[in-house]
């Protein structure tokens, strides 16, 4: 049976009143009728005294028990993650015997409140970091249940909250990796696997985590998007393969023809013919090397663009003169049409000439003999546009997106036969960017190509 302090105080008060009353009656025989101490009068007086004693005892017991009740209520609030009003608990300090208890209780509450705050802020900090991480993070229990999965992981792996076990996630990713093998990796190591999901290349690292006593607590899965580095790596590999191939082809011809010449037994005409091929191939190699050097300089920002104000019409006339011979060789007609009020452009003189020459050379190369190549120029919204239109073979729509890539050619064999390396437009793109210009290519197969560029008229 549980003892109640309140009840003890009340019972003791009543017993005390009864004892005091009976003692008083016995000691004061003359004052009260002693024959019958249980007379009606005495019982009424006793009843009134008991009632008074009861009321007093209720007040006293409440006063004694209330602080303990408040402390107990406070404890329950703490248990539920809330905090009691300390000022109310402090009221218990009125009772001397409780002062030490309430002081200790209040300081304990303060410590708990501070620790809880620290813990909560640490937890919310960790949650914010996890949610805003670019890498995906999933934590599993020792049973392989998901306990945390951040947004990046859900996005990269196309997961929903219902996919909440290690096995489900691994089967979705086609990963053949047993949970226990990951959980009990030797020497607390981690294991990395690669996976492709949609267009993404992912690196996935699994690592077990442990308690302070080194008991296994679960597995962390970290998902990293490595698409860009895989792409860069592929571009680099492709670039090296392209350069090797482009150098190998002319070198093979040079070796073959020079060996034939060295073997003798050739007529003078044959020697001249073979030497011409050797010379052509050597020129191609030297053009390739100088194009590569130019691109590499632009990659490392070593090519300086010395921008000045340039007369657009004069620049275009100069360029037309430079390519006129080449155009005439193929009986092309070259037309330059400029607006009357032609503002100057603010660009680097050498690179702008190279840009227009590369575009015009393409039109000359990829237009069947007797074609028409028109160059339009005029002002447009504080800038100057230059448009080159040909009626040549055109570029298929599917190739237009990749046309500025290094070594990209629509028809490799045809372009190579024409002496092209596939670097012309990638150099043009870099140079247009360096001059704060824009470039756009429109084309229709078998109809022709239209290249539109704009350049600033002043320092922007
Ligand atoms: N005006 C055009 N008409 C048709 N096809 C074009 C035209 N301009 C470019 N192309 C296509 O785009 C490809 C890439 O052009 P780019 O100028 O970069 O290389 P290239 O002309 O082959 O070689 P390079 O210019 O380095 O000598 C060409 O191989 C060709 O297939
Ligand atoms: Mg070209």
Image: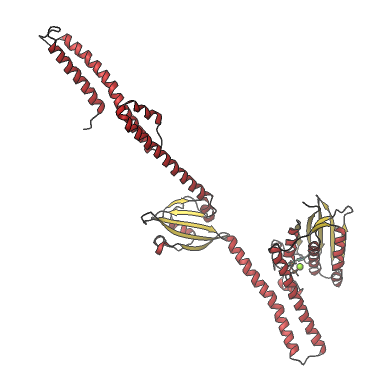
Name the one closer to the observer, 97 or 131.
97
In the displayed structure, 71 sits above or below 240; it is: above
Question: Is 112 above or below relative to 265?
Answer: above
Q: Position of residue 183 (x, y in %)?
A: 40, 60
Dividing the picture into quadrants, the one containing residue 75 is top left
Q: Residue furthest right?
A: 340
Kindly identify the residue that appears in the image at 48 percent across and 48 percent down: 126
**Residue 197's quadrant in the figure?**
bottom right
Q: Residue furthest left?
A: 35
Task: State how many labels appear.
Answer: 0
* Rendering coords of residue 167 (x, y %): 43, 58
- In the image, is 92 to the left or to the right of 193? left
- Regarding residue 392, the answer to whether it shows in the image is no
The residue under the point 50% across, 60% down is 204
Front-most of residues 156 and 248 = 248
Q: Residue at x 28, y 24 (%)?
A: 61
User: Which is more toward the observer, 210 or 99?
Assistant: 99
Q: Nearer the viewer, residue 74 or 248?
A: 74
As displayed, is residue 159 above or below residue 289? above
Taking the image as shown, residue 434 lies to the left or right of residue 43, namely right
Q: Is residue 92 left or right of residue 367?
A: left
The percent position of residue 138, horizontal first and vertical second, equals: 47, 54
Q: Quadrant of the N terminus?
A: top left
Question: Horizontally, is 164 left or right of 419 in the view?
Answer: left
Of all residues shown, which one is farthest toward the bottom?
Answer: 265
Residue 145 x, y percent position in the rendering: 41, 53
Ligand 1 resides in the quarter of the picture at bottom right
Is any atom of residue 316 visible in this view?
yes
Q: Quadrant of residue 65?
A: top left
Q: Indicate the colouring scheme.
A: secondary structure
């Amino acid at each position: 049976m549980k003892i109640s302090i309140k009840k003890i105080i009340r019972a003791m008060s009543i017993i005390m009143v009864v004892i005091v009353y009976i003692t008083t009656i016995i000691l004061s025989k003359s004052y009260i009728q002693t024959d019958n101490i249980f007379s009606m009068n005495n019982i009424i007086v006793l009843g009134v005294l008991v009632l008074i004693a009861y009321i007093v005892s209720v007040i006293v017991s409440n006063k004694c028990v209330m602080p303990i009740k408040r402390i107990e209520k406070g404890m329950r609030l703490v248990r539920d993650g809330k905090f009691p009003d300390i000022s109310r608990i402090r009221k218990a300090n009125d009772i001397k015997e409780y002062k030490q208890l309430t002081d200790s209780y209040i300081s304990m509450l303060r410590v708990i409140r501070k620790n809880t705050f620290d813990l909560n802020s640490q937890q919310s900090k960790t949650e914010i970091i996890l949610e805003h991480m670019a890498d995906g993070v999933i934590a599993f229990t020792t049973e392989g249940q998901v306990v945390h999965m951040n947004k990046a992981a859900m996005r990269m792996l196309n997961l929903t909250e219902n996919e909440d076990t290690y096995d489900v996630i691994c089967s979705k990713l086609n990963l053949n990796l047993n949970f226990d093998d990951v959980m009990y990796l030797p020497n607390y190591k981690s294991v990395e696997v690669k996976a492709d999901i949609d267009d993404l290349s992912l690196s996935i690292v699994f690592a077990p985590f442990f308690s302070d006593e080194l008991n296994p607590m679960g597995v962390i899965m970290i998902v990293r998007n490595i698409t860009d580095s895989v792409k860069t790596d592929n571009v680099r590999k492709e670039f090296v393969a392209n350069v090797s191939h482009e150098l190998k082809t002319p070198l093979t011809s040079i070796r073959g023809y020079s060996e034939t010449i060295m073997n003798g037994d050739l007529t003078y005409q044959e020697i001249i013919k073979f030497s011409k091929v050797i010379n052509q191939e050597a020129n191609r190699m030297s053009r390739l090397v100088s194009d590569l050097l130019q691109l590499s300089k632009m990659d490392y920002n070593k090519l300086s663009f010395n921008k000045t104000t340039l007369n657009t019409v004069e620049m275009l006339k100069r360029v037309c003169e430079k390519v006129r011979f080449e155009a005439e060789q193929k009986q092309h007609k070259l037309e330059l049409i400029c607006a009357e009020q032609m503002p100057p452009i603010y660009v680097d003189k050498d690179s702008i000439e190279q840009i227009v020459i590369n575009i015009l050379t393409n039109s000359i190369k990829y237009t069947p003999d007797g074609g028409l190549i028109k160059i339009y120029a005029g002002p447009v919204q504080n800038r100057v546009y230059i448009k080159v239109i040909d009626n040549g073979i055109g570029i298929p729509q599917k190739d237009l997106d990749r046309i500025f890539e290094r070594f990209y050619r629509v028809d490799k064999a045809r372009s190579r036969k024409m002496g092209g390396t596939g670097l012309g437009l990638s150099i043009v793109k870099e140079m247009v960017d360096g001059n704060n210009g824009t470039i756009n290519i429109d084309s229709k197969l078998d109809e022709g190509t239209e290249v539109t560029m704009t350049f600033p008229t002043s320092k922007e």
